[in-house]
Image (cartoon, helix red, strand yellow):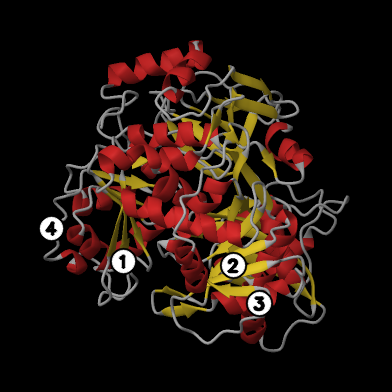
Amino acid sequence: MSYPFQITSYGQYKEAYKKSVEQPEQFWSDIAEQFLWRKKWDKVLEWDFKKPDVKWFINGKLNITENCLDRHLDTRGQVPALIWEPNGKEEPHKVITYKELHFKVNQFAQVLKNNGVKKGDRVCLYMGMVPELPIAMLACARIGAIHSVIFGGFSAQSISDRLQDAQAEYIITGDGAYRGGKDIPLKNTIDDALVTCPFVKRVIVYVRTQSPISMIGHRDVWWTDEIKKVEAQGNPLVDAEEMDAEDPLFILYTSGSTGKPKGVVHSSAGYMVYTTYSFVNVFQYQPGDVHFCTADIGWITGHTYIVYSVLCAGGTSLMYEGLPAWPDAGRMWDIVDKHKVNILYTAPTAIRSLMAYGLAPLEGKDLSSLKVLGTVGEPINEEAWHWYDEHIGKKRCPIVDTWWQTETGATMISNLAGVTPSKPSYATLPLPGIQPVLVDEQGKEITGNDVSGNLCIRFPWPSIIRTTYGDHERCRLNYFATYDNMYFTGDGCYRDEQGFYRITGRVDDVLNVSGHRIGTAEVENAINMHTGVLESAVVGYPHDLKGQGIYAYVIMDAMPDNKQLAQADITQTVARIIGPIARPDKIQFVTGLPKTRSGKIMRRILRKIAEGELANLGDTSTLLDPGVVNEIKEGRV
């Protein structure tokens, strides 16, 4: 199996990039030809960023699972599609071939049909990192249902918010999940969430931890019982539902600058074409390579680079149930050696946490199978880049520093492994089809090199966000209204003398904690729900491990006698409402916040104090109460 659209030289990259800008429709049409279609498209692209309205491969018909599974059966049926490494070392791993995965997806697609799921229905998946999660995703896609995966660390309240927004009537979950040394009570959390979601018709429960759980009659059913019913039906093959190119494939919720999470909608065809193109080129994937992405499938990285792009390319995807340093700091390197991993794709946070253990966990680890290393989720600092390069890649594996977002679907700016130049802490160059532009606060383009600005994209790419579920105006306001006729990423960016791009962090009220986006408003809303809290303001600050930590300034109705206990209570409240991932790292109790006379909180000042930049806070004379700034400075934690 070869990839006709794989770029193999810097010169070829320049040619492809030039064609993608000058003849974008012809460029993407040629790439889309390499996929399996029920009916070819009538027109490649229609777009209007003002509405926004973007359509790719118009009137094309397909089903993504036929591209992920069916088309590989004759030539790659016995090739491993998924390798699953369990949480604990003593449990055996699983290898699922394309033929086996095709069978299991068809089987579970019939389970869904038996339970009343139809094309267009929303199905929520709240599971651990077990093979049944991608099986369920693909089964949804096969019958045209829209899946919405919720990360297993989110709270009942967060799940309820998402279920209500998507009006998801069907849930697939587990009794529990293993994650390092913890058992996560998935079904109990779902039960708590469903108190406020009476519209849910069916909950399908997969047994993983054998935890005691409640099963409600006429609503909750066991995965294994439903599979037995399908076996009794003779395991019928399920015809893949014919989908329009623009039919939604999935909804994935992401934090925004307001408290309510927004459901990012990706399409069936554009997402498939662009994600596969990016996978094959960024990682320089070769048939037979084992690709190990350490992300959780609850995030976009797992959707794209564990499931859809790898399977569309006929590749082998390794998924791991546990944590990078559990039960010991050599776990990741054991997995690399055990499965002869060729491509390792992980987050800078994971690299920094493994660095902290020193080099002892690497002793006796071979790692010679590795060919390509990758990072995702946040900009990687130079120290971590060099450690990764020297100790994991042995200075012979190119490192791809990939910049992209939930909303973009796949990698947008990155070097192509061993093909285009790399530079520590730089994403470097855009992929063909991606037209980045830097603008100032007024939206005026900043040209030339050695410049900084807000990062926008001026032309659509196939896997661009189509809408925010049920609220298209929110999509417009968030991404397309800030700057005229451009997609605004929310990130700041520096372009160096060579034209290489370096992402400098969020410029809106969104934090990037361990590579996960968390809205400040979402955390503030949770803090404000705690008894006795009158108001709060949340900012990010540099964190050695997470990249960004969460610093909360909190006004109470009375200053607490026991500050440590009050901080712990607030932290627990946030974990309960959003999930442990959003817990503040630092909480400072204050009597007031720096506000303008119109009542706007000056987060710039709070950010600088949190960062320890106490000398240069700018002009504070316009504040309603300038004196509050000194008090906050003196009380910094």
Q: Are marks 3 and 2 in contact (CB under 8 Å)?
A: no
The spot of residue 208 in percent (x, y) is 43, 75
Nearest to viewer (mark 2 / mark 1): 2
Query: Which amino acid does the dot numbered 3 rest on?
Result: Asp
Question: Which badge, 3 or 1, comes first in the chain's sequence?
Answer: 3
Alpha-carbon distance for marks 4 and 1? Answer: 20 Å
Of tags 4 and 1, the one toward the viewer is 4
Question: Helix, strand or loop at disc 2?
Answer: loop
Measure the C-alpha gap from mark 3 to mark 1: 38 Å
Q: Amino acid at mark 2?
A: Phe
Q: Earlier in the sequence, mark 3 or mark 4?
A: 3
Q: Residues within 10 Å of mark 4 (few under 14, many from 20)?
A: some
Q: Secondary structure at mark 3?
A: helix
Q: Residue 458 location in percent, x, y?
A: 60, 23
Instruction: Name the image quarter holding residue 339.
Output: bottom left
Residue type of the residue flagged with mark 1: Ala
**Which residue position is annotated with label 1?**
356
Q: Which mark is residue 482?
A: none
Q: Earlier in the sequence, mark 3 or mark 2?
A: 2
Residue 177 position (above or below residue 107): below
Residue 366 is labelled as 4
- Residue 298 at least partly seen: no
- Tell me which corner region of the image, top left, top right, bottom left or bottom right, holds residue 475: top right
Q: Foreground mark, 3 or 4?
A: 3
Name the residue beneath numbered marker 2.
Answer: 154
Q: Report helix, strand or loop for mark 4.
A: loop
The residue drawn where x is 32% and y is 35% is 423
First of labels 4, 2 by sequence position: 2
Foreground residue among 305 and 495: 305
For residue 191, the mark is 3
